[in-house]
C-alpha cells in the first residue's frame, strides 16, 4: 500500500506560537490530501481538503486563517496552526492516496499547547 | 443529517469473537470500510465492502447489507493486540477524486482481557 509520512509525531508549544505539521506521500504523487482532527475517544473530523497548486477547501466551522494549508508539491502538504491556544491541542492526521475503499493515513501528530 | 452509529465499547476475553455493528444514514453510498486505530497511532485499513455479503480476511471479516444500511466487523480468535479502536467509514459520494470524502463513525473501543 501507499506510504504516508507525517512529521512531527509530537509537538509541545507555548500558547500564541505557530506550529507546522508536514504530510508526505513517499511512494506516489498525491494531488489531493486531507487533514483531520481527532479528539480523545472521538472520530476523525475532516478539517480541509488540500489541493496541489490551488487553495485548500475547508469544512464548515474550520477557520482557514488559523489552520493554514499549503500543498506546494505532489508529495507534500503542510498544516500550520497559527497562534495556537490550548483548545487547539489535539491529534492531527493527514490522509493521501488510496483506492476506492482503502485510505492511507499518516502516523498522526499530537499537538499540546501549553 | 448524515450519521454512522456504532457501539462505543466492547470488552471480550482472548480467543473470543466480537462483532462490531455499524448503521449508517448518508446521502449517498459507495462502500463501507473498516479501520483499526491503536492509541496514538494512525488508522490502518482492515476491509472494504461495496456489495452485499461477507468479506473474509484472516481473523477479520466484514459484512454489508445495503438494504438495511448496516454492516459489521467480526473479529475472531481475539488476541491482546486487537485491543484498539475500530472505525467504520462510508464513502458517500463519487467524485472525480476517486477517494472522495468519507464519513467516519465515532469508533468502537475493543478491550481484550486475558
Image: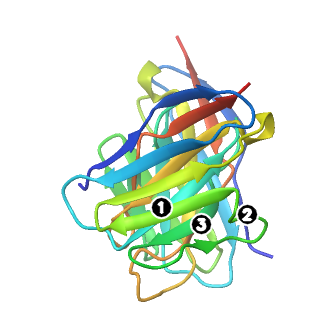
For label 1, the SS is strand
The image position of residue B23, as x and y in percent, is 68, 64
Chain for mark 2? A
Q: SS for tag 2?
A: loop
Q: Are marks 2 and 3 in contact (CB under 8 Å)?
A: yes
Q: Which of marks 1 and 3 is in front?
A: 3
Q: Nearer the viewer, residue A27 or A80?
A: A80
* Residue A36 placement (x, y as % from top left): 58, 54
Task: Tell me where residue B54 appears, x and y as whole percent.
Answer: 41, 62
Q: Mark 3 points at which residue?
A: A48
Mark 3, Cα crowd under 10 Å, few <14 / some 14-19 / many 20+, is many
- How far, Cα to Cα, is label 1 from label 3? 21 Å
Contact? badges 1 and 3 (CB < 8 Å)? no
Q: Calculate the distance from the C-alpha at mark 2 to the C-alpha at mark 3.
A: 8 Å
Residues beneath discs 1 and 2 located on the same chain: no
Tag 1 residue: B33
- Viewer-side residue, A93 vs A74: A74
B50 shown above or below B82: below
Q: Which residue lies furthest to the top in this view?
A: B114
Front of the two marks 1 and 2? 2
- Co-location on one chain, circles 2 and 3: yes
Q: Is residue A60 left or right of residue B36?
A: right
Total numbered badges shown on the rendered structure: 3
Report how far apart the C-alphas of labels 1 and 2 lie in the structure.
26 Å
Mark 2 sits on what residue? A62
Amino acid at each position: 500500500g501507499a506510504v504516508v509520512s507525517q512529521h512531527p509525531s509530537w509537538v509541545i508549544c507555548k500558547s500564541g506560537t505557530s506550529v507546522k505539521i508536514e504530510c508526505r506521500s513517499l511512494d506516489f504523487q498525491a494531488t489531493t490530501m486531507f487533514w483531520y482532527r481527532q479528539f480523545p475517544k472521538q472520530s476523525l473530523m475532516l478539517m480541509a481538503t488540500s489541493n496541489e497548486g490551488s487553495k485548500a477547501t475547508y469544512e464548515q466551522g474550520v477557520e482557514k486563517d488559523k489552520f493554514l494549508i499549503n500543498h506546494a508539491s505532489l508529495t507534500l502538504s503542510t498544516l500550520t496552526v497559527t497562534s495556537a491556544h490550548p483548545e487547539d491541542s489535539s491529534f492531527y492526521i493527514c490522509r493521501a492516496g488510496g483506492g476506492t475503499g482503502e485510505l492511507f493515513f499518516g502516523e498522526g501528530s499530537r499537538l499540546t499547547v501549553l | 443529517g448524515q450519521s454512522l452509529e456504532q457501539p462505543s465499547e466492547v470488552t471480550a476475553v482472548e480467543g473470543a469473537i466480537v462483532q462490531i455493528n455499524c448503521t449508517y444514514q448518508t446521502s449517498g453510498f459507495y462502500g463501507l470500510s473498516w479501520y483499526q486505530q491503536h492509541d496514538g497511532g494512525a488508522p490502518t485499513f482492515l476491509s472494504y465492502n461495496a456489495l452485499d455479503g461477507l468479506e473474509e480476511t484472516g481473523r477479520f471479516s466484514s459484512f454489508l447489507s445495503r438494504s438495511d444500511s448496516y454492516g459489521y466487523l467480526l473479529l475472531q480468535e481475539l488476541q491482546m493486540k486487537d485491543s484498539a479502536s475500530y472505525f467504520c467509514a462510508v464513502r458517500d459520494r463519487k467524485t472525480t477524486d476517486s477517494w472522495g470524502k468519507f464519513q467516519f463513525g465515532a469508533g468502537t473501543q475493543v478491550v481484550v482481557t486475558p
